[in-house]
Image (cartoon, rainbow, N blue to C red):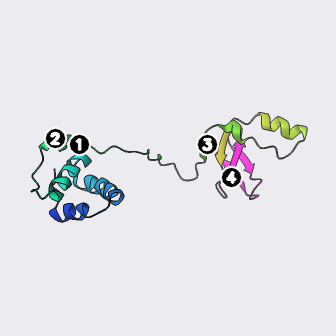
């Protein structure tokens, strides 16, 4: 566990509450200490006391991820969307169009303009985007 430099602790003690909260999160991740431990060190410094090395229970500290990183997709792979049924657009009221719309069970983003497109599971499929009029072929 790396100790937090005195200059960082002094800078934290001079900040207002919101900026301190953001900076504490950054410093805690940077030096591998918990935010609670960092708060104790800053409060000890601001109360005029000396900053002591806190117990080594931070050795097991692992910062949690608050978001999930998207998995990398191969080049040319379509971006699939959840809830394909909410993207069923009615562009053409003809019978042929209605029968095609009933086959839609997936939704992807147009690779050119990022408009949601409803498509069937058939592959390969050639799709003409009604928004940008670009044609794309999807193989997976």
> Which secondary structure class fits the magenta region best?
loop
Q: Residue 81, which numbered label?
A: 3
Chain-order first, disc 4 or disc 1:
1
As drawn, the label of residue 79 is none
For the residues labelled 3 and 4, say whether their Cβ atoms are less than 8 Å apart: no
Tally of numbered discs: 4
Q: Are marks 1 and 2 in contact (CB under 8 Å)?
A: yes
Q: Is residue 91 visible?
A: yes
**Labelled disc at residue 57:** 2
In this rendering, which labeled residue sits more in front, label 2 or label 3?
Answer: 2
Q: Position of residue 39 (x, y in %)?
A: 23, 51
Looking at the rendering, the stretch of residues picked out in magenta corresponds to 111-140
Mark number, residue 61: 1
**Residue at point 64%, 37% (across, down):** 83
Along the line of sight, which residue is nearer the eye, 13 or 57? 13
Q: Nearer the viewer, mark 4 or mark 2?
A: 2
């Amino acid at each position: 566990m790396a100790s937090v430099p005195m200059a960082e602790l002094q800078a934290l003690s001079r900040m207002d509450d919101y900026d301190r909260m953001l900076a504490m999160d950054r410093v805690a991740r940077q030096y591998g200490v918990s935010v609670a431990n960092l708060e104790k060190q800053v409060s000890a410094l601001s109360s005029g006391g000396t900053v002591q090395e806190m117990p080594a229970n931070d050795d097991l500290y692992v910062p949690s991820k608050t978001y999930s990183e998207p998995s990398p997709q191969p080049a040319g792979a379509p971006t699939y969307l959840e809830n394909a049924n909410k993207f069923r657009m009615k562009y053409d009221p003809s019978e042929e169009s209605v029968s095609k719309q009933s086959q839609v069970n997936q939704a992807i983003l147009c690779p050119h303009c990022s408009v949601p497109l409803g498509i069937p599971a058939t592959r390969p499929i050639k799709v003409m985007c009604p928004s940008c009029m670009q044609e794309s072929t999807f193989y997976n």
